[in-house]
Amino acid sequence: MGKTFTMRPAVRHAGADDAGQVAELIATAFAELRVVRYLVPERRERHKVIAAHYRVLVDHAIKHGQVHLIDDGPAAAVWFPHVSPPSPPPGYDSRLAEATGEWADRFRVLDGLFAEHRPAEPCDYLAFLAVHPDCQGQGLGTALLQYQHARLDGAPAYLEANDPRNRDLYARNGYQGRGTFALPDGTVFWPMWRPPAP
């Protein structure tokens, strides 16, 4: 049974010591998503490979973006400031190949689609919003969004929703759809933009 929060959950900034925990959380939260099955078709290898890939991005975000955690870590958000073009993690190609092995080309396809659809306008980019399956439906994702939106002080934000439930959560928090794109297997993504405050 999941935790029940009676007060507004506390948000803290993750440091380098939290990176492994955050990568594992994202891998666990995303385990049943269609995109994850596309990226790593082999079920027995999936969690290990996905977590290793997320670790590369989380490490980069801790140094060059922001990673926010709820309390002891049942939910996390990974943000990057948007510059055009955004800088990849140092040694990304080799680290990607090491983390993802025989499935590296599938990750490169997804990276290419993200780059193709990313807006040219300056914005903050939400790379991941992950809530542990035992704690979903408790408002933790919304709390993380609201925390960052307050810090953005009206600046725009962008993300790619990866399933209809997530898309609807973001829409409730001010994000607007910008069409769709799909992976070769038909997995759909919804690019979403939160316009600047007037």
Image (cartoon, rainbow, N blue to C red):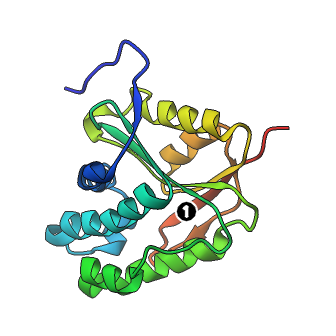
Q: Secondary structure at mark 1?
A: strand
Local crowd size for mark 1, using a 10 Å CA cut-off: few (<14), some (14–19), many (≥20) = many
Q: Residue visible at 43% across and 59% down? A: 63
Residue 108 vs 40, above or below: the answer is below
- Pinpoint residue 17: horizontal percent, then vertical percent: 25, 50
Residue 42 vs 174, above or below: the answer is below
Residue toward you, 11 or 75: 11
- Pinpoint residue 126: horizontal percent, then vertical percent: 54, 53
Q: Residue visible at 47% across and 81% down? A: 109
Which residue lies most toward the right here? 198
Which residue lies most toward the left here? 44
Which quadrant is the N terminus positioned in? top left
Residue toward you, 75 or 182: 75
Q: Is residue 22 left or right of residue 124?
A: left
Q: Which residue is mark 1?
A: 189
- Pinpoint residue 120: horizontal percent, then vertical percent: 74, 68
| Residue 34 in sight here | no
Which residue lies most toward the top here? 6
Identify the amino acid type marked 1. Phe
Q: Is residue 155 left or right of residue 71?
A: right
Residue 179 vs 16, above or below: the answer is below
Q: Residue visible at 34% across and 68% down? A: 56
Which quadrant is the C terminus positioned in? top right
Residue toward you, 67 or 35: 67
| Residue 100 in sight here | yes
- Rendering quarter of residue 180: bottom right
Q: Residue visible at 39% across and 82% down? A: 91
Residue toward you, 33 or 89: 89
- Pinpoint residue 86: horizontal percent, then vertical percent: 59, 71
